[in-house]
Amino acid sequence: MPREQEIIVSIKAVTKSYHRGNQPVPVLEEISFDIARGEFLALMGPSGSGKSTLLNLIAGIDSVDSGSIVVDGVDIATLGEAELAGWRASHVGFIFQFYNLIPVLTAYENIELPLLLTPLSRRERRQHVETALSVVSLSDRTEHYPSQLSGGQQQRVAIARAIVTDPTILVADEPTGDLDRVSAGEILSLMARLNAEFGKTIIMVTHDPRAAEKAHIIRHLEKGLFSDVST
């Protein structure tokens, strides 16, 4: 369970629709809930239930139609595009299903990318990257390119990239969806360690009940609404 009950994400009456031609298609309807600092939350539901949309809204990738999303005291729905980009760079670590590594960059260079947007010196960036590589147990793969790494190792590089800025929240969209069972188990154990040992707040979308078991709380979305909450 989280180490403290301070609310880090507060979502109030969030509504989101997309358009198919001129026809609005509701995705989320009046969603409200809070996430405590240090929580590990899994969002589950069938395709089209709105779980990835909700994750993108929390991460500031997409914008709400109405309602508010407050992350660590900032209502991100009120931020302009430039402000939001800066906020994401400082506060959100992204973990994707297909890793999203740049193939012509080494593991080190992929992990360093988010730090290039910060005022850190080259020496400070190196210290951050080496720490992140150590956390994910890939210090011996610094100069390897993605094509020289297994799927599980590539996802660990992606996780190192996500944590290298010490973000407020980690958002993970099907982080084990492209991995075999053994590699998936290793990634889930790493995420659980980031939560338990480093106090990282994690919000994870998954179809896999075994992945969701690593979370403290499981929320199920059905047609844009929460159907239940499991702990």
Image: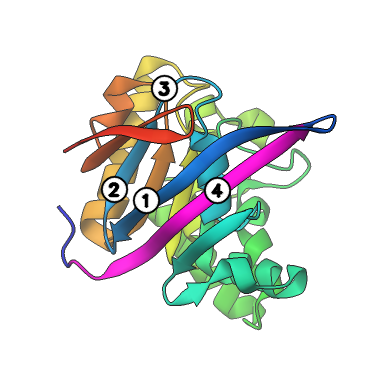
Of marks 4 and 1, the one in the foreground = 4
147 part of magenta stretch:
no
Instruction: Choose between 128 and 118: the one closer to the eye.
Output: 118
> 99 or 58: nearer the eye?
58
Task: Return the disc, 2 or 4, that comes first in the chain's sequence.
Answer: 4
Residue 156: % across, % down = 47, 41
Q: Which residue lies at the image location 63% right of the left edge and 72% below the top edge?
A: 78
Looking at the image, do the residues carrying marks 3 and 2 touch, with CB atoms under 8 Å apart? no
Q: Is residue 16 magenta?
A: yes
222 on left or right of 126 = left
> Label 4: few (<14), some or many (≥20) within 10 Å?
many
Q: What element carries label 1?
A: strand
Q: Which of marks 1 and 3 is nearer the N terminus?
A: 1
Number of the label disc, if any, that sits on residue 93: none
Judging depth in this view, the residue of 9 and 212 nearest the camera is 9
Q: How far apart are marks 3 and 2 (CA)?
A: 16 Å
* Mark with earlier residue (3, 2): 2
Picture disc at residue 15: 4
**Which circle's residue, 2 or 1, is located before the other in the chain?**
2
The answer to whether residue 31 is above or below residue 100 is below
- Asked if residue 158 can be seen in this view, the reply is no
> Which residues lie in the magenta part?
5-19
Q: Which residue is drawn at 60% across and 58% down?
A: 60
Does residue 58 appear anywhere in the picture?
yes
